[in-house]
Amino acid sequence: TEIPVLTLTNTYAQGGLTISKTVKGNAASNEDSFLFTVSLTDADGKVVSGTFGGYEFKNGLCEITLTGGQSVNIQDLPIGATYAVTETPAEGYTQTAPAAPATGVISTEAASVSFTNERWAVDIQKKAVGLIGADTVAPMVTVGDVFSGELLSGGEAERIYLTPGKTYAVAEENAEVAGYTLVSALLSGEGSGLTVNGMNFVLGDTSTEIPVLTLTNTYAQGGLTISKTVKG
């Protein structure tokens, strides 16, 4: 004896995108920051602007900063929009995944992209043996294709970023010092994951700390002996 009520309910959905960051390597740090740019375009290729899940897209672009181990989830993105996530290169880091900017289409299923960067390093220092007083040497040193520059004996070590598992050759020029003879040049090293063979070295991907390479030049000077003999 009462009038029933019909309810017509429409349920709508929007999409989400999660971006996560991982760092690896003996020189990587979870405290380092990485800048990402997220772009949105519609099915016609036009930029999509607005605020979605608290993130503002201006002219279709939004910049987000993450540190190692962090992730961000952008909610309420329009279904059908195409996204592209690009990372700005960071000093010494190599982006190992994904190989290219991460792209996809927003759907009712949450999208997720994970960026991994690696940073591996050794420190190299110069030592001179046999020089007298304040004499120093600063030869031009090259390490494979990753470093070329002067290293001052007794000076600060130079940090070199490189690829683990790859063999690097160390060479030097202009190591001569006036009044001395260069007797030998020796490459030595100590630290996690480091293998030295002659003037070559390899850093393994099991390294947990930054090892130190030492390039030692040994110098010598000539001598003159005067003797005296008397007879009669």
Image: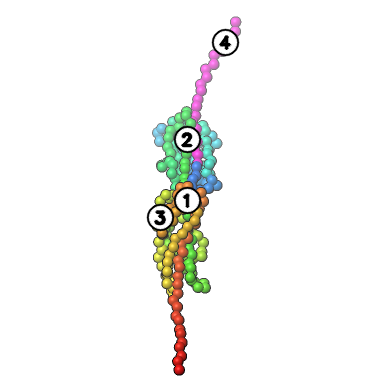
Q: Name the residue that disc number 1 marks.
A: 193
Residue range in magenta is: 1-21
Q: Position of residue 124 (x, y in %)?
A: 47, 59
The answer to whether marks 3 and 4 mark residues whose Cβ atoms lie closer than 8 Å is no
Say the numbered circle drawn on residue 4: 4
Q: Residue at x 46, y 37 (%)?
A: 113
Amino acid type indicated by mark 3 = Tyr
Q: Position of residue 156 (x, y in %)?
A: 51, 61
Q: Residue at x 42, y 35 (%)?
A: 104
Q: Residue at x 40, y 33 (%)?
A: 44
Image quadrant assignment for residue 173: bottom left
The answer to whether marks 1 and 2 mark residues whose Cβ atoms lie closer than 8 Å is no
Q: Residue at x 57, y 10 (%)?
A: 4
- Mark in front: 4 vs 2: 2
Amino acid type indicated by mark 1 = Gly
Q: Name the residue that disc number 2 marks.
A: 112
Camera-side residue of 112 and 221: 221
Is residue 8 covered in magenta? yes
| Helix, strand or loop under label 1 | loop
Q: Position of residue 93 (x, y in %)?
A: 46, 49
| Helix, strand or loop under label 3 | strand
Give the main secondary structure, helix, strand or loop, of the magenta stretch: loop
Q: CA distance from mark 1 to mark 4?
A: 77 Å
Q: Quadrant of the C terminus?
A: bottom left
Q: Name the residue that disc number 3 marks.
A: 168
